[in-house]
Image (spheres, rainbow, N blue to C red):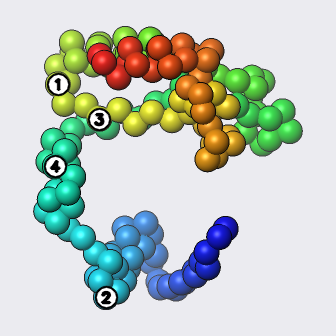
Amino acid sequence: MRYKRVVRYSFEPNMDYNRAAKIYREYVKETGLFKSLKEKEVTLSKISELQQCAVVHTGIKAHTEKDSRFYNGQEDVIHSFDSVKEMMQSLHELGSNKLYLHLDGWGDPGYDNCHPDYLPACIEAGGWTGLKRLQQS
């Protein structure tokens, strides 16, 4: 927390996440912070490759303390990098050619643990070698 943060609340009837996103969009346009996808594409050319991609959201390691309300009898749930690679290959074989993999919990302490110091890649899931195999598939 090295810099000042400001929270701006907007109270409106029938508020949901769509309305909140529209309010935020109006705010960034008013403040000059808004960048369209076309503007972002100038410096991030790969953005155009993401169009019409299916998003695959999965995780490698999740650690839950026993006293957490999310604890379900297992402290650690681990999926190897190779098992995620196999899943992605299966999706390709089924006809999904354009996929975006959103991979949570790939760091050794697991999902949402020890940020920003979450290195190395999860050892129990295959470490850096396993992550590299997944990236190359």
In this view, which residue lies farthest toward the bottom?
30
- SS at circle 1: loop
Residue 19 visible from this viewpoint: no
- SS at circle 3: strand
**Looking at the image, is mark 3 or mark 2 earlier in the sequence?**
2
**Looking at the image, is mark 2 or mark 4 earlier in the sequence?**
2
In this rendering, position of residue 47 left or right of residue 121: left
Q: Nearer the viewer, residue 51 or 6?
A: 6
**Looking at the image, is mark 4 or mark 1 earlier in the sequence?**
4
Residue found 35% across the figure and 23% down from its top: 135
Q: How far apart in space, not on screen, are marks 3 and 2 (Cα)?
A: 32 Å
Mark in the foreground, 2 or 4 = 4
Q: How far apart in space, not on screen, are marks 4 and 1 (Cα)?
A: 20 Å
Query: For residue 68, which quarter of the picture?
Result: top right
The residue carrying pointer 1 sits among few (fewer than 14), some (14 to 19) or many (20 or more) residues within 10 Å by Cα, namely few
The residue carrying pointer 4 sits among few (fewer than 14), some (14 to 19) or many (20 or more) residues within 10 Å by Cα, namely few
Please state which amino acid type lies under the numbered disc 2.
Glu
Residue assigned mark 1: 97
Please state which amino acid type lies under the numbered disc 3.
Tyr
**Looking at the image, is mark 1 or mark 2 earlier in the sequence?**
2
Residue found 70% across the figure and 24% down from its top: 76
Q: Nearer the viewer, residue 68 or 40?
A: 40
Residue assigned mark 2: 30
Q: Work out whether 64 lies above or below 97.
A: below
Residue assigned mark 3: 100
Residue found 61% across the figure and 75% down from its top: 3
Please state which amino acid type lies under the numbered disc 1.
Asn
